[in-house]
Amino acid sequence: MTSQDASVMLRPRAEALGARLPPLLVAAQHLAQSIELGEHGRRQSGQGEAFWQYRRAQPGDPAHRIDWRRSARSDSHYVQEKEWQAAHSVQIWIDPAPSLAFASDPDLPQKRDQARLIGLALASLLLRGGERVGLLGGAQPPGRGRLALSRMADHMLNAGDDAKLSHAAAVPHARQIVFSDFLGSLDETRDFVLAAQGRGQKGVLFQLLDPMEEAFPFQGRVLFQDVSGVLTHDTREAADLRNRYLDRLARRKAELSDLAKRAGWRFHTYHTHQPPSSALLWLWNAIGGPAR
Amino acid sequence: MSVFGIGFAAPWLLLGLLALPVIWLLLRAVPPTPRKQVFPAVTLLLGLEDKTAQADRTPWWLLLLRLLAVAALIVGFAGPVLNPDGQATKTGRLLVFVDDFWPAVSDWAQRIEAIETQLDNAQTAGRPVALVLASKTELSGVDQTVDWQAADIWKASLAGLRPVAWDAAYGTVEGWLLSDQATDVLWLSDGVKRDGRAELLSQFEQLGAVEVLEPPSARLGLLPAKLDGGDLVLSILRSRTGASADLTIEAIGPDPEGVERVLLSTPTQFNENADRVELRFTLPSELRNRITRIQITDHRAAGAVTLADDSLRRRRVALLNTVGEREGLELLSPLHYLREALATTAEIIELPTLSELIKASPDVVILPDVATFSDADRASLTGWIEQGGLLLRFAGPLLASADLGQGVTDDLLPVRLRAGGRVVGGAMSWGDPRALASFPESSPFFGLTVPDDVRVEAQILAEPGPDLADKTIATLSDGTPIVTRRAIGAGQVVLFHVSANAEWSSLPFSGLFVQMLERLAVSSQGAARDSVALEGTTWVATQVLDAFGQLSPQDAAAGVPGNMLVNPVGPSLAPGLYADGDRVQAVNVLRSDSTLERTDWPAHVTTSWQVDEKQQEFGPWLLAAALLLGALDVVLTLMLAGRLRPAARHAAMGAVAALALMTTTTSVEAQTDTDPNVLEAAGIVTLAHVLSGDADIDRIAQAGLKGLTDQLFMRSSVEPAPPVAVDIENSDLSVFPMLYWPLTDQTPIPSPDAIVRVKRYLAAGGLILFDTRDAGVGGNSSTSRRLRAVALPLGLPLLDQVPHDHVLTRSFYLLQEFPGRYRGPVWAEAPPPDAERAEGMPFRNLNDGVTPVIVGGNDWASAWAIRDDGRPMFPVGRGQAGERQREMAVRFGVNLVMHVLTGNYKSDQVHVPALLERLGE
């Protein structure tokens, strides 16, 4: 293949990639619009942009903080206090495991696509509230503004999703949002959560499951394969496995829920046929809730 | 090779059955293949062991199914044949002789089948075959040459064989059957006794073996109906006696709306061992006059139909009796002789005034010696004649003395008359009474013999003129007209130039008088016309009966001399209805003296009727069964492998069931149930549109009515159910308050049945909104012409443009016009001409009821039509004005439905103030 051919091939690919980006962003922002953003102040004086209250100047207040305009209307001096607006950092991690690239029905979205959509929508929402948002394991630390959002989307789509769930990449005091189906080994997750707990990081375990994984609607002789085709399981009567499978799934969920509870985290299971907006609302409350 | 009465075309294939055990073993050894399923949660499955292993091996019943399928295939291809033909193969020629007279009709299809079977056998044996029809031997006798052909050539022409509608003796066979070769004869007899059968049989027996196929069932025949004292008498014959048998007789004729239907249906029964049933009906003459034919229900044969003609009908004759009954003068009364002549053959009405006579809608009005009429009587009489009435007048002293018709032509006289009259015999005259001249060929009386003793003593003379000869239909021996006739419109006036009593002539005494009245279609003979009555007349067939008893109209047939009509039907005289002017003569297959008896074969001839036991190949059925089993196997295998989702499982089982139904011959009669739409509509107001035959138009009409329904929901307390489409041919209309009927130039014209139902619907208070969708351009557009064609048979009242004070303008909204997508004129039932505006009322009281139709071309449905999302389907006009027009269209729709549902209620509302005032008093 000549270099010319390569460049010819490159362009449609680049265009295809570029074409995917805006719709994802638009979809995420559209989803985020559905949630009314309340006042995000801390209801106490502190560092911030918005006016909070006037108070009499105390000894020790630097002179430049005196609000002369207010003070001129009375005999004493006043200092203008701003509302404390602390920006949080939030880090989002989306499981790169191949098992997320699965949808049981052509009409359903893949688990990963849905995770990206919800994650970006949450990021958009947080950015509107002035928080810092970034990807765990991404090239950039959590940032602000629209640029951070498009950087995240770009990174999600174009860079390989091979970031490990490791607390080494976690920014101190940043909230951690973990998107995964949690169908693989839980060791890594457990380590991460416990480490985060040790560092005082709060977070959310967000499990995405396909409806088929919840229902197990199989009968007869079935050869099960995972997405990459590495793992297989052969059964002669699938219906017979159903109860035992569902038992295992429930146990896994209980384990995750337990893990989250112990660490002060939140755990939620979302099925890809459900509307993403409810999941987003839950996430928004889960992050905003404890801090208020 | 034959096993248990089943023969095989390729028996060696059956060895394949030996392979079945091998297949069994092979199938058992192979378990069903697993299905691959991508499943991310496979990690959770790892380590789970199967408890049962049901799908390990193919279940035994599935194996059995597959083996059955294979066995069916093998046996099917081996070509099994049920009832293989075990007869020793015959050689030599085969003569198939077929009775094709009308008694053979009732099992004609089986006859053709039987012939086909025989031809098949002959073809296998390579025998030359001749097919001879019995009717042809009668026709051409000795000239018949036998045409020996290969069997398949005859087979090709079998479909074209048709029985004839008559019956006759067999012809001779000598000329065409001389043969030195051995010839077998197969005689398909119709089972009815007929002359010449014995001779024919002996001829055939000289040729070779004779086999006779004859159905065991009886042939039925219906003799012509007779009138006996006003009762209708029918005789039904059957060709062989036996057990009692039920049958139904039906009389068919036009109903008052002109649609042909069964007027009378009577069950009856042959008693055991009886070969004849007599039925007697007492019918009102109105009904009896309508009957055009009588037939045996479900028995299609020319002999089982009898056609009705004038002999069953009584014409209604009105006599003007100004004198009243006066005792003693009976024999002098001109009416006496007419009464006597007509009493048995016509229905006589006698009334003193002309206007009442006309109201009785008579066929004939007879005026004995009436000279003057009031203007009103003259007008009504003229109108009645122009509609087809026959006015018969007689001369007399009054007419002779009246100065009438002289100089100018009187409307109600055929010729101008001379004043006075003429006395040709008697005490005061020189001449002798004159006799009648024989009738000329152009006269309707031609053929009647003039008795010598008829003498005319006095007459009224016609003014000579250039056209007098044309109008004269009978003369005296000296050439003076004695009966004259003139056509007026569709009717005619006939004047006898003598009086109707015996004063002027002895004509009223004579039998000739009665015959003349019969020829003039004044009276009908109580019995069928005989050859004397038919002498000299010419008749034209108007409708012809075929062998299957179907009556079909006949155009441009050649005339038949009257005396031929009494001959038995045959090749030269087809059964049917023959007409001569107003008179109708039926030519029936069976005459009143006909008989129907069973054949009398000699003892050595045995008859059989074995057309059913044909050899049957059932290989194709086995192959179909194998196919079906295969399909079932696919479904079951998929189900075992768990590859069928529940929905797909039902669909697949349904498909297999449907396949099974298709391949079996059992036809399941669908129960005709009332349309659920109709059931719904009976409970709740439902708008309906008539299917126009154009899918697009129907869709728009549906959407339009949907839009109107929604608007009614919003605006008024009328809350209709979703609109439905009705098929004018099948649906029950009575439950719909109104029908919207969009027309195109392709709209099918409703059948007579549908017309009757639509008329009934309109009469019961329904309303039809006709929409030509051409902006009311009207005129001669193709849609307008189609509208006329559709609406013409409905008998609609006079229409007029909806006047400004019609109740339609104020039944809900106050409206000035009724636009749809276009603004055109709208038509409804015209107001009565005497409608006037009452004092104190803003409106005339126009319609005391709902107009049965509203006609326009404004394409209302398009203006009302909404899409699924509730927005209008089509633009109306432009901008704001257009929206206003759409609003007006909707208001028209609301007004229309209100008008339909409330009738003239709004019209009555104007009386409310007056009523309240009266209550206050």
Image: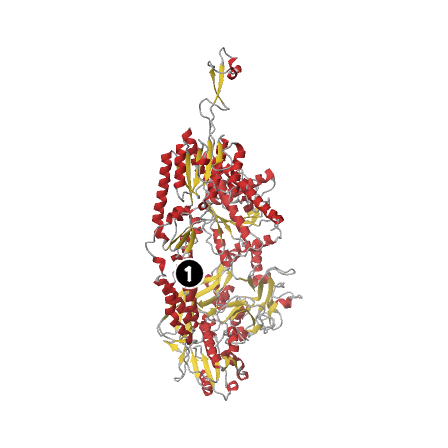
Q: How many numbered badges does the structure rendering display?
A: 1
Q: Position of residue B743 (x, y in %)?
A: 56, 52
Judging depth in this view, the residue of B709 and B520 nearest the camera is B709
Q: Position of residue B445 (x, y in %)?
A: 57, 71
Q: Is residue B748 visible?
A: yes
Q: Amino acid at mark 1?
A: Val
Q: Position of residue A132 (x, y in %)?
A: 49, 31
Q: Position of residue B44 (x, y in %)?
A: 38, 47
Q: How is the image coloured?
A: secondary structure
State the image quarter where residue B425 is shown.
bottom right
Residue at the farthest right position: B466
State the image quarter where residue B599 is shown.
bottom left
Given the image, what chain letter belongs to the residue carrying mark 1? B
Query: Looking at the picture, does residue A138 appear above or below residue B28?
Result: above
Picture residue at 49% right of the left edge, 18% below the top: A80
Picture residue at 42% right of the left edge, 29% below the top: A291
Query: Looking at the picture, does residue A270 appear above or below residue B784?
Result: above
State the image quarter where residue B86 is shown.
bottom left
Judging depth in this view, the residue of A59 and B707 nearest the camera is A59
Judging depth in this view, the residue of A130 and B592 nearest the camera is A130
Residue at the farthest left position: B51
Query: Looking at the picture, does residue B891 appear above or below residue A238?
Result: above
Where does label 1 land, which residue? Answer: B634
Judging depth in this view, the residue of B327 and A212 nearest the camera is A212
Picture residue at 52% right of the left edge, 82% below the top: B148
Query: Looking at the picture, does residue B729 appear above or below residue B181?
Result: above
Q: Residues within 10 Å of mark 1 (few under 14, many from 20)?
A: few
Q: Is residue B832 visible?
A: no
Q: Quadrant of the N terminus of chain B?
A: bottom left
Q: Quadrant of the C terminus of chain B?
A: top left
In screen coordinates, is A239 left or right of B766?
Answer: left
